[in-house]
Image (cartoon, rainbow, N blue to C red):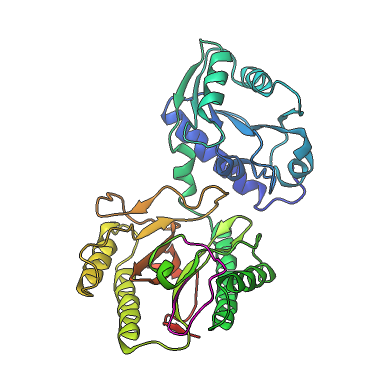
């Protein structure tokens, strides 16, 4: 067992048993988990920079998971993995052939095996090669979101990591508002944010979207050499993570001064969000707060139709993934459950407001806690 587990061995055992129960309900005798988050969630194993190498976990329907990974990552295996059984490959090996040998040794040659087809690790060429080498007597089926569904409900220990990420996000926003002044560059904001979030506990120095001027009216823009001017709107999103568990939030900022209309818009957006969040409780349909968001935005008269999703699930996320799969749109048919965690946001005319929340037995808890107001630097 690893010397530096992020969770108790009992928590990993529970996760594996839950997934094995789901496997039985689908008639699966084994699962091949290729998504890095699935591997880490079930086994603990993670190389902070090496998970882009070909790694996967074999989850038999009974017994412990078995890992397949590059031998240069042995240090991280010894520190992070909750289970001991493993196969390793070395540079220069026929990795696919070794993978097939590992799979056959654990599941045999005539089992029903689920596979995470959506995983970016399992690209089309690798899938074709592996299935071409595996015995034709193995029934390979798409396991879909089998593990991902379990990951939607966070344990108290997982949510605590997200709370810690929230504190790092707040420190980063403090740093941003101090730097975002006329004459400074967007890049200077990014540097200040990166340093602040790392000092406050974030795993990585990777600011979220930072954009000013016309770019503030878009989403997913990153900082550039653009110089800030008095009156600019700046879109700020802080996206730190602790042990790869995320919490994030957005605030609008005005450089130097804000007009009365801009202050009213920011106030409207915060009030719309407050009304929507006040409706959240276990068992409440996802479209209930979503409708409040959309009707509220339409009432501002700025946009004719609000097209963004309004919530998306966040938690254990490894690049390139930036979100979990569950999201809220007018077509959502699911309901909130205790332990779910979401980033929930509104973006209108360059003004972005958001929080990360956890669903509780009585409603919700904000995992990001920062003054809900238009920032004027």
Which corner quadrant of the image does residue 202 belong to?
bottom right
Residue 297 is left or right of residue 77, and the answer is: left
The magenta segment is: 221-235
Q: In this rendering, is residue 10 above or below 341?
A: above
Location of residue 249 in the rendering, given as x and y in whole percent from the top left corner = 47, 68
Q: In this rendering, is residue 71 above or below 104?
A: below
Is residue 226 one of those drawn in magenta?
yes
Residue 59 is left or right of residue 102, and the answer is: left
Q: In this rendering, is residue 74 above or below 205?
A: above
Is residue 204 one of those drawn in magenta?
no
Q: What kind of secondary structure does the magenta stretch mostly adopt?
A: loop
Location of residue 305 in the rendering, given as x and y in whole percent from the top left corner = 22, 62
Residue closer to the observer: 246 or 349: 349
Which corner quadrant of the image does residue 312 belong to?
bottom left
Which corner quadrant of the image does residue 342 belong to?
bottom left
Location of residue 64 in the rendering, given as x and y in whole percent from the top left corner = 64, 33
Residue closer to the observer: 282 or 97: 97
User: In which quadrant of the rendered image does the N terminus lie?
Assistant: top right
Location of residue 167 in the rendering, given as x and y in whole percent from the top left corner = 58, 72
- Residue at 44 percent across and 44 percent down: it is 149
- Residue at 55 percent across and 69 percent down: it is 166
């Amino acid at each position: 067992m690893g010397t530096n587990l992020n969770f108790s061995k009992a928590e990993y055992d529970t996760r594996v048993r839950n997934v094995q129960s789901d496997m039985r309900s689908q008639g699966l005798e084994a699962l091949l988990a290729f998504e890095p988050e699935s591997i880490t969630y079930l086994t603990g194993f993670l190389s902070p920079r090496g998970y882009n190498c070909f790694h996967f976990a074999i989850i038999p329907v009974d017994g412990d998971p078995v890992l397949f990974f590059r031998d240069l990552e042995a240090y991280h295996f010894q520190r992070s993995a909750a289970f001991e059984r493993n196969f390793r490959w070395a540079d220069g090996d026929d990795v696919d052939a070794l993978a097939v040998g590992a799979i056959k040794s654990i599941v045999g040659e005539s089992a029903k095996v689920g596979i995470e087809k959506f995983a970016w690790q399992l690209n089309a060429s690798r899938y074709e090669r592996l299935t071409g080498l595996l015995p034709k007597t193995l029934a390979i089926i798409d396991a879909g979101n089998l593990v991902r569904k379990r990951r939607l409900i966070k344990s108290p220990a997982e949510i605590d990591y997200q709370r810690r990420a929230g504190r790092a996000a707040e420190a980063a926003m403090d740093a941003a508002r101090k730097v975002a002044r006329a004459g400074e560059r967007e890049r200077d904001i990014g540097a200040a944010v990166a340093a602040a979030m790392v000092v406050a506990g974030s795993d990585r120095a990777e600011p979220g979207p930072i954009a000013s001027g016309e770019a503030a009216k878009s989403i997913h823009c990153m900082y550039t050499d653009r110089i800030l001017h008095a009156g600019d709107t700046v879109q700020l999103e802080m996206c730190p993570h602790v042990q790869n568990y995320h919490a994030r939030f957005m605030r609008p900022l005005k450089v130097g001064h804000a007009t009365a209309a801009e202050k009213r818009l920011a106030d409207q957006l915060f009030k719309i969000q407050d009304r929507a969040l006040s409706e959240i409780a276990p068992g409440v349909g996802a479209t209930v707060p979503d409708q409040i968001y959309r009707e509220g935005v339409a009432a501002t008269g700025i946009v004719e139709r609000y097209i963004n999703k309004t919530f998306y699930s966040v938690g254990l996320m490894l690049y390139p993934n930036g979100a979990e799969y569950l999201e809220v749109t007018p077509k959502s048919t699911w309901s909130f459950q205790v332990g779910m965690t979401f980033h929930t946001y509104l973006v209108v005319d360059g003004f972005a407001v958001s929080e990360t929340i956890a669903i509780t037995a009585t409603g919700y808890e904000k995992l990001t806690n920062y003054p809900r107001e238009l920032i004027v630097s």
